[in-house]
Image: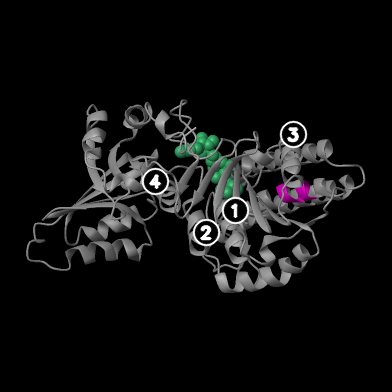
Amino acid sequence: MNLVVMKFGGTSVDGAEAMRRVGEIVRRSPARKTIVVLSACAGVTNQLLRIGHLAADGGPEEAAAIIQELTRRHLMIARDLLSPSVRPEVEAAIEAAGAELLGFVRGISVLGELTPRSLDLLASYGERLSSLVFAASLNGSTPGSTLVDARTFMVTDDQYTKATPDLEETSARLQRIVGPLLEAGRVIVTQGFIGATPSGVTTTIGRGGSDHSAALIGALLGADEIQIWTDVDGILTADPSIVPAARRIRIMSFREASELAYFGARVLHPETILPAIRKGIPVRVLNSRRPSSQGTLIVAQPNTAKQCIIKSVAYKEGISLISIVSTRMFLAHGFLENVFDVFHKYRTVVHTVATSDVSVSVTVNDISHLHEITQELRHFATVEVNRAKAIVCVVGDHLRNSPGVAARVLQAIAHVNLNMISSGASEINLSFVIDEHDVESAVQSLHAEFFSRVDEYEEIFD
Ligand code: ADP
Ligand code: ASP
Ligand code: MG
């Protein structure tokens, strides 16, 4: 293998022991060139965002206490992990970051205002600190490592907290900055999630975005494989926290994986797959606690002898169902256009849609502009909003040419009240909206229906 991009999530770098394991995995990488993309230590991004909110809302002491805790946590990892020759420098950098954060909190609390731009700068400390410590831990081993600040190459627009990378500029900078280091045999350590505008202001590309960073870097540099290292054995037939007996999926298609990610299987960020698809680069999801497990391989076309209808069950909570009814829809062309214009105006993504002659129901996950959206919709329709809903879906490439699946799904969840059913245009998922409190039972029933007798598919499931 020539080039591999390895991304390690928060739990994989959560402490000295975990980082040691990651170091071992990186050293054993058979690839000629390796780029390591790191997340912040588990929980740190949430803490950093909380620091910002506390500072703005009159809680600077509590914010300072969290900063102290964060600083101590990273210092402890450094102490445990690093050799005496590199430790003092890293410790000084961690202390300096803590002091910067404190200064920052003072600034925010004086202004009493927390902008998305400040939130991004705050959040960036998580990845910057984890990568600082980890890169230093590789020092002295062969091959040598170089820490490259992602903000020098990941160029984004200025949509703070969910910035979009500029592929052309990022590609050019990767070639220029990272290319020669790789050629020189250095292992590159960098941060996921963060980037910068062309003028150098720090941005982030959305929560859980390190997967996306890794996939982009891999696609732009033409990697042979993108590896997403996490805390489970790969992509499983359901979220293991709800279905402990969930099985590992050995191989699946890009389409299935992106559909699953989109519908909430947190193990992979939805934006991860696209750059890989574009270049046809395989993505592998692996367990950093059990590197010997083969993980899940995601490819364009899995070449398995047998084909199984359903690969996985996913769910997404925190969904709002908006029902829009217009008695004037009859004869009124352009109604749907008007409806979607409103969502577009407030940059709110609609997940699933069902329409009838006089009504349209949509689900959204982002409710930051829900009030404005419903106000505008009410100019031409009656609107009802139901919160605390969830989308549950079954995904599989062969769903579209397999009769009888819908009947099995409905039978399995006959005990649950369904608000909406939708079979996506991609025809590889069947999804429905239910109450949040029914999720566990629905997912378990569906899993039992589709995965209790899959032993004949040993090529596909563990
Ligand atoms: P990381 O910090 O490595 O990015 P995440 O917490 O984002 O890790 O994703 C891994 C978690 O995703 C697992 O611990 C598991 O609880 C959850 N998960 C949800 N659905 C699935 C699924 N279908 N397969 C595997 N893991 C899943
Ligand atoms: N640390 C970031 C987050 O928690 C990005 C990531 O882990 O992927 O959202
Ligand atoms: Mg993740």
- For marks 3 and 2 on the same chain, the one whose residue lies earlier in the sequence: 3
Image position, residue 198 (x, y; %): 62, 73
Instruction: Say if residue 111 shows up in the picture.
Output: no
Residue found at x 40% / y 49%: 259
Q: CA distance from mark 2 to mark 1?
A: 8 Å
**Quarter holding residue 216:** bottom right
Decide whether the magenta segment is chiefly helix, strand or loop.
helix
The residue furthest front is 305
Please state the horizontal and vertical placement of residue 176, each as a whole percent of the image. 71, 72
The residue carrying pointer 2 sits among few (fewer than 14), some (14 to 19) or many (20 or more) residues within 10 Å by Cα, namely many
Say what secondary structure mark 4 lies in: loop
Q: State how far apart marks 4 and 1 are (Cα).
A: 21 Å
Q: Is residue 94 left or right of residue 51?
A: right
Give the residue type at disc 2.
Ala
Q: Residue at x 62, y 60 (%)?
A: 223
Query: Is there a contact, CB below 8 Å, between mark 3 and mark 1?
Result: no
If the image is split into quadrants, where does the N terminus sit?
bottom right
Q: What residue does disc 2 label?
A: 276
Instruction: Tell me which amino acid carries mark 4.
Output: Phe
In the rendered view, would you say 269 is above or below 312? below
Which numbered circle lies on residue 17?
3
C-alpha distance separating marks 4 and 2: 19 Å
Could you tell which of marks 4 and 2 lies nearer the N-terminus? 4
First to last magenta residue range? 130-135
Circles 2, 1 touching at the beta carbon (< 8 Å) = yes
Disc 4 designates what residue?
A: 263
Residue 226 is labelled as 1
- Whether 134 is among the magenta residues is yes
Comes first in the chain, label 2 or label 1? 1
